[in-house]
Amino acid sequence: MSNDLSRRSFVAGAGLVTASAAAALAAGCSSAPEAPAPAAGEGTGLPPVDPGAVAATEECDIVVVGSGSAGTYAAVRAAERGARVVWLEKNASRGGTSAVTEGLCAPNTRAQLATGGETDLQAFYESEMDWHDWGCVSDVVWAYLNNAGKAIDWALEQGALLTYVGAPEAPMYICIGENGWVNMGTGMLTPLWDYGDTMPNLDLRLETPVVGLVMEGEKVAGVYAKSPDGSITQINAKAVVLGTGGWGRNPAMVADRLPVPSERVVFCGMDGQDGDGINMAIDAGACEHSRSAVMYGLSKVVGDPWDGITTIFTQWPPSWWVDPEGICSPGKCLPMVNHEGRRFYNETLVEECNTSRLNVCIASQPKVWTLFDQDHVDAYSVITDFNYGTGTAVGNFAESIAKSPSIVKADTIEDLAKAMGVPPETLSETIGSYNARILGEDDSHDPFGADPGYQTPLLTPPFYAAAIESNAYGSCGGIRTDGKMNAMHADGTPVEGLYIGGQDNGSFWYNDYPYGEHGGTGQAFCCTSGFVAAESACDALGI
């Protein structure tokens, strides 16, 4: 079990914030070989736009599609540089899932460098590449490393409330307002939106989805946008930036891409992450990269919000334990069992925050429960307003359990098994041997390699079982780009006029999100890729 604190282990409220340290980063000087480019898609089945349905035609320099962090940075930065920008968002409000995110990891801002701590970019690079089996696009990783600090400094200049709270090996930033932590929507995006709203050359249009790309041969030359009244406008542009938020809310794409049963994974991102940008880029000739990569979070109670009180205090206990004064500190883990009433995982590994491993293992089981006893309920029920530094969970744990349709309880383990629908003898044997090792009554090795010192015994009735499911913030597999965020054909040549940012861009990833190793890079890459896309497009247009 790792001694490193989780990326969520912040202490906030009175302005005191401590970011987690990432795991040790590899050192060295070798360069990255490029992963082979995947083949371009065969077409996505998106309905073609009938040119006869176009009601109006417009001209601009750059169209930005999507208004999360990638779209916001791209649209506002391009307009600041003088481009005539049309900014399109399919939803009725801006921000997407970025609006409710926690923090970001961006090396070498001015605030960080002022502390005297400079991130070793080579070590960070090698650690990132190692996590992804060296399958990331090397130029894109370096584009992030070399530009993330610049992008965040730019946002700070426009009033973003980003505050450096990390260490050089884990340069984290969260947004702190007058009353403590606020989410990215309030603390970072709103100031950028306010700044963009002052620009006459930035034309934002909500409830205006893009339904296709305008093509001139193999060149992207604009978009077809559907207005709220249903009419189609052809917006001709010299460059298009796609940042539509990935495919996490598209059931067909989820089922096609996930290596585990897709019905066992719940994506908690906002509506609108339908893969539109990725599909349009594929139809324009772009190829995909890391198509199945996912931003897994921690597991969650079935039907509960990812940050609900029952989920936090049953799925996050390794990071939060309650001492007699009611203060949270790193603690122990609860057991999980499957549909047979058997343990199937080393639960203490969750402290290392490899959320891909955790969620893939859970999703591979037909059904999973987390078990706990009354001592656990009593310990956590002393907290009714829990500020964990990156948000606030309000409520009483015991009351939430009583109301949850996903939690059952019983006075004996055998009766608990019956309520769960698992074999009573099997569950009794499972918990009996589990408790015996923790209590020192059985010195045999745990079959899953867990250290009993980090496990929580189940001793005090009643006993509880919470049905749990895998959870993901969103997808991160998408389109392959170069370091300028220019979409690429399968042969390695650029798709002229098309730039990809945020979760539509799969180049920064190969395996799933490195939650524990480089937590915060997801949001930071969205910001940085949008910023770099704007710079690249403006440079190419001579703006």
Image: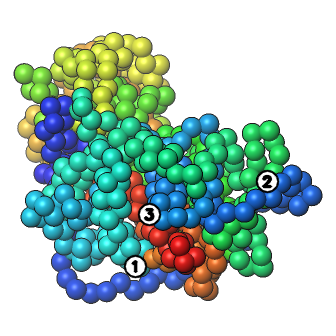
Q: Is residue 237 visible?
A: yes
- Mark closer to the observer (1, 2): 2
Question: Where is residue 382 drawn, in percent x and y?
Answer: 19, 16
Q: Residue at x 32, y 36 (%)?
A: 182
Residue positioned 19% across, 82% down in the render: 28
Q: Within the image, what quadrant is residue 128 found in?
A: bottom left
In the displayed structure, does residue 58 sit left or right of residue 304?
Answer: right
**Residue 233 circle label:** 2
- The disc placed on residue 129 is none
Question: In the figure, residue 524 lies in which quadrant?
Answer: bottom left
Q: Is residue 454 above or below residue 65?
A: above
Disc 2 residue type?
A: Thr
Q: Are marks 3 and 2 in contact (CB under 8 Å)?
A: no
Residue under label 1 = 138
Pick out the residue farthest to the right.
52
The amino acid on which the numbered mark 1 sits, given as a three-letter code, is Ser
Is residue 66 in sight in this rendering?
no
What residue type is disc 3 on?
Phe
Marks 3 and 2 sit apart, C-alpha to C-alpha, by 26 Å
* Mark with earlier residue (1, 2): 1
Residue at the image position 25 percent from the left and 43 percent from the top? 8
